[in-house]
């Protein structure tokens, strides 16, 4: 595995675990947050099973990793748990800028309909596919609930930040997204953190992307790490987490932030969404052209030589994608032909 790819999976594993179970929160107690010890605040923030029904979440990663070059990744979404027998409502978008170009895409779930967005154009997922995904998701949720309770804590996942957050300190109080918070800082025992990463990998079937050997190898690239934590002054729920990694050649900053916890979120279907077939058909034609063949559909005749069987706009889109090759910026620009 290439080092930069393995490093990305480590970042996803660490921050994904916090996103899954880190909203936490607990009883602030009569003494109040400002007088509680840093260790107590960390335990309350990451040890509770208090559920989050709605809000907004942002995850960003930015930095330089040696020969891998600079990168800037951002994933933002608003979400609402919705009805019991439906997928959660979600409106999310991700963007990536790197030396290889840029990419922008997103996904929307209204609870009854699903959409994908590519370069600002929305595509409707078929009702059959959405229903199938809903059934699979609800089945997985039921299994998780039986195995780990209604909401998994970090401890239940085998992750114990209190064991690898070193010498936590209270910096003061401030506001994050309009919510009053207590700001904490801590060092990181990197080997212990990576031991928990191995647990995340094993528990979430990521071994095909990231092996234990990959984690050990990359551990030598991380020279030091520090963490900033903002926990709610009154409810001790995570509002912001920032991890700074100093590498042998470069540095990376990760940031996870929750806003509007348990506040209603307006999530609606996009207007004028195209069929997802408009996208997959053009990509299929492009794949056929790249392999030197001509795409056909069972029961149809092969188009005459020199034609592709596509409309003029589809042909322009396929030609644009072929010319773009692996340049993400050029690929995104091809959306004008859809």
Image (tube, helix red, strand yellow):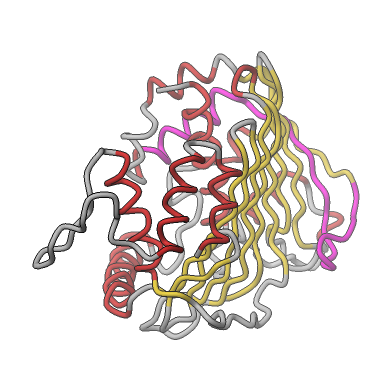
Percent position of residue 326, x then y: 49, 36
Q: Camera-side residue: 82 or 235?
A: 82
Quadrant assignment, res 315: bottom left
Q: Camera-side residue: 312 or 83?
A: 312
Residue 179 painted magenta: yes
Q: Camera-side residue: 11 or 50?
A: 11
Position of 98 relative to 304 (above/below): above
Residue 113 falls left or right of residue 18: left
**What stretch of residues is rendered in magenta?**
172-201
- At 38% from the left and 66% from the top, the residue drawn is 311
Position of 237 relative to 284 (above/below): below
Residue 46 painted magenta: no
- Identify the residue at the far left of this view: 299
Q: Check the picture and name the quadrant holding the N terminus.
A: top left
Percent position of residue 27, x then y: 68, 67
Position of 240 relative to 8 (above/below): below
Residue 231 falls left or right of residue 25: right
Percent position of residue 29, x then y: 75, 66
How many marks overall? 0
Residue 216 falls left or right of residue 277: right
Q: Camera-side residue: 89 or 194?
A: 89
- At 67% from the left and 47% from the top, the residue drawn is 60
- At 47% from the left and 37% from the top, the residue drawn is 325
Percent position of residue 250, x then y: 70, 20
């Amino acid at each position: 595995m290439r080092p930069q790819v393995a490093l990305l999976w480590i970042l996803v594993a660490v921050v994904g675990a916090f996103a899954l179970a880190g909203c936490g929160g607990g009883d602030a107690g009569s003494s109040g947050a400002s007088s509680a010890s840093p260790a107590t605040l960390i335990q309350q923030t990451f040890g509770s099973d208090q559920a989050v029904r709605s809000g907004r979440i942002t995850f960003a990663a930015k930095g330089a990793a040696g020969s891998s070059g600079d990168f800037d990744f951002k994933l933002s979404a608003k979400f609402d748990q919705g009805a019991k027998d439906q997928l959660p409502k979600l409106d999310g978008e991700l963007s990536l800028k790197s030396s290889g170009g840029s990419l922008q895409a997103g996904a929307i779930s209204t609870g009854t309909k699903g959409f994908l967005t590519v370069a600002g154009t929305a595509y409707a997922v078929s009702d059959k596919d959405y229903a199938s995904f809903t059934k699979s998701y609800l089945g997985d949720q039921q299994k998780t609930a039986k195995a780990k309770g209604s909401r998994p804590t970090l401890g239940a996942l085998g992750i114990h930040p209190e064991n690898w957050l070193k010498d936590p300190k209270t910096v003061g109080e401030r506001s994050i997204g309009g919510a009053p918070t207590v700001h904490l800082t801590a060092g990181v025992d990197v080997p212990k953190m990576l031991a928990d990463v191995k647990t995340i990998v094993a528990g979430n079937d990521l071994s095909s992307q990231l092996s234990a050997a990959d984690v050990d190898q990359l551990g030598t690239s991380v020279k030091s790490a520090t963490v900033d934590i903002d926990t709610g002054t009154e409810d001790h729920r995570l509002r912001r987490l920032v991890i700074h990694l100093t590498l042998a050649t470069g540095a990376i900053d990760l940031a996870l932030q929750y806003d509007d916890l348990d506040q209603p979120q307006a999530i609606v279907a996009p207007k004028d969404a195209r069929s997802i077939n408009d996208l997959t058909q053009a990509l299929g034609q492009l794949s056929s052209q790249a392999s030197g063949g001509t795409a056909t559909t069972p029961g149809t005749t092969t188009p005459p030589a020199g034609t592709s069987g596509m409309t003029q706009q589809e042909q322009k889109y396929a030609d644009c994608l072929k010319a773009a090759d692996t340049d993400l910026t050029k690929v995104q620009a091809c959306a004008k032909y859809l």
